[in-house]
Image (cartoon, rainbow, N blue to C red):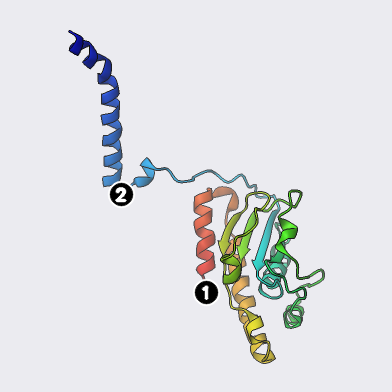
Amino acid sequence: MARRWLYLALAPGIAELLRQSQDFLAAARRGREGAAFPRDRTPMTMKENEVQNVLFLCTGNSARSIIAEAILNYDAGGRFRAFSAGSHPSGTVNPLVLEFLKSQRIPTEGARSKSWDEFAKPDSLPLDFVFTVCDSAAGEVCPTWPGQPMTAHWGVEDPAAYMDDPARATQVIREVFHLLRQRISLFTNLPLAKLDRLSLQNKLREIGKSR
């Protein structure tokens, strides 16, 4: 009698465990592990008319990140607000970069080399996106950014490595400019308000691989 009572008491729980195990195995066989371990499909809270704050990072904040900041502010300034900074800022902007940007009729007023610490203070402007454009900065431990921004690596070649040959450095600056402008165009044309976080993160990474 005691055994029968014990069986009746435990049977519902055992049945539920068996059902969950069967569901898990079925999902695995279908190649849908995501059904058992759901990924972050949280919808983005962005609205089409919201201005998104974007920070571009490199080590010295003298060339690549300056170029990206200038392009985004010029090409999509109504919907995005771009900034740039460096983990170890050089303190000066590469003059060849400023010269090239001016030749493309892109404003350079206010461009300066500065530390990423300016954007990591508790009262700093909340950021929506942070992109590293050099491998060194991507490998460093970044500060905690206000706003919990989405991040991606968009590495490009460093013009500073060719400063002993101004003609070659200018050529690299031109190549970097066109590659970053292409990536930024892909980024600004994403339907941000319609993408969940996982989908958007994947697209940001794909953009960083474009050539």
Numbered badge on residue 31: 2
- Residue at 22% in and 16% down: 7
Q: In the image, 3: left or right of 146?
A: left
Numbered badge on residue 211: 1
Q: Position of residue 107 (x, y in %)?
A: 78, 72
Q: Residue furthest front?
A: 2
**Quadrant assignment, res 136:** bottom right
Mark 1 neighbour class, 10 Å CA radius: few under 14, some 14 to 19, many 20 or more: few
Residue situated in front as seen by the camera: 62 or 48: 62
Amino acid type at mark 2: Gly
Q: Residue furthest top?
A: 1
Q: In the image, 123: left or right of 21?
A: right
Question: Looking at the image, can residue 78 be seen?
Answer: no
Q: Position of residue 10 (x, y in %)?
A: 26, 19
Of callouts 2 and 1, which one flags the residue occurring earlier in the amino acid sequence? 2
- Which type of secondary structure does the marked residue at label 1 adopt? loop
Q: Position of residue 190 (x, y in %)?
A: 57, 58
Image: 29 above or below 142: above
